Amino acid sequence: MPDFQPFIAFANRLADAAGRVARRYFRAPVEVAYKADISPVTRADREVETLLRELIAGEFPDHGIVGEEFPSLAPEAEFVWVLDPIDGTRLFLAGLPLFATLIALTRGGVPVLGLIDQPITGERWIGGEGLASQCNGRAIRVRPCPELDRALLCASSPHHFLGAEGGAFERLRAAVSWTQYGADGYGLAMIANGRIDLGVETGLGPYDFLAPAAVIAGAGGVATDWQGQPLTLGSGPRMLAAGDARAHARALDRLAG
């Protein structure tokens, strides 16, 4: 196994660089365009990802890159960096400091390192499978919550769940104590922090879920697709994360009906 310390140091350098750009545009006039799915993208999204790609190419030219805003580069490489420059662009545009930069490193398609950075509040989570998660250098841990009726669930928006997915989401939502909307990757970081118990999402790309999945795993939690399979670079668009494996199993049953 390689020494992962250089990768950890480099991921922190990437987050520092991303934060400098994001802070410059936050609550400032910024041009907005819309993708085919009507999701917004800003100059800040593209500038951050461009910068991160340049830094990766300079430091690890043999590594692949998968990002939200530009085509993938060598996604079949042994090591691949997976980037979401501004996860929660709508939150960013609304001036809410709940967006995040998500950075993951995969080896053979499996996430081995994840970083979540909120550059306005100055919070940074880093961790992975076999790498105990930390927030700003402090060890963090998920909290026990075996029963759904005691659980706090987070989801980006109830409007993301359509058709059969809408029914599955409603079964889970009805079973939990309450649901918090609108935090995206930041909400998933709160699972690792022991503040939220479950997170459910759909319509995602690997840049949305691999970094949070690694951080949650490093804090003692679990993150899978809706069939309970581990999340990888090739996973589909659905994610279920939990601090407690018992709640995760019960949530999978609810989603399955």
Image (cartoon, grey):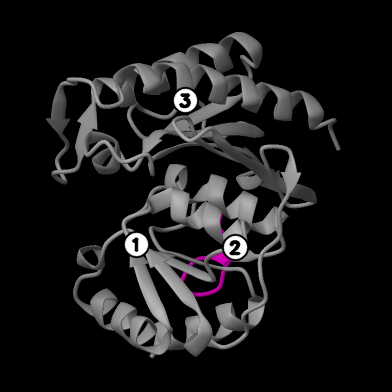
Q: Position of residue 236 (x, y in %)?
A: 42, 58
**Quadrant housing the C terminus:** bottom left
Q: Residues within 10 Å of mark 1 (few under 14, many from 20)?
A: many
Residue in the foreground of this view, choosing between 13 and 35: 13
The numbered disc on residue 160 is: none
Which residue is labeled 1 in the image? 202
* Front label number (1 vs 2): 1
Label 2, residues with CA under 10 Å away: few <14, some 14-19, many ≥20: some
Q: Quadrant of residue 168?
A: bottom left
Q: Which residue is drawn at the image coordinates 56% and 61% (left, top)?
A: 191
**Tag 3: Cα neighbours inside 10 Å, few (<14), some, or many (≥20)?**
some
Q: Amino acid at mark 3?
A: Leu
Q: Please, what secondary structure does the residue beneath circle 3 have?
A: loop
Main SS, magenta residues: loop
**Can residue 32 be seen in this snapshot?**
yes
Q: Which tag is nearer the camera, tag 3 or tag 2?
A: 2
C-alpha span from label 3 to label 2: 23 Å
Q: Is residue 229 located in the magenta-colored stretch of the structure?
A: yes
Q: Earlier in the sequence, mark 1 or mark 2?
A: 1
Q: Mark 3 and mark 1: span between their CA atoms?
A: 25 Å
Q: Do the residues bearing badges 3 and 2 touch, measured as CB atoms within 8 Å?
A: no
Residue at 42%, 32% in the rendered image = 67
- In magenta segment, residue 213: no
Q: Which residue is under mark 3? A: 73
Indicate the secondary structure of the residue bearing disc 2: loop
Residue position for label 2: 230
Give the amino acid type for the residue marked by disc 2 in the picture: Pro
Q: Quadrant of residue 13?
A: top right
Residue 101, horizontal then vertical, whole percent? 46, 34
Disc on the earlier residue, 3 or 2 = 3
Q: Give the residue type that dot 1 points to.
A: Thr
Q: Nearer the viewer, mark 3 or mark 1?
A: 1
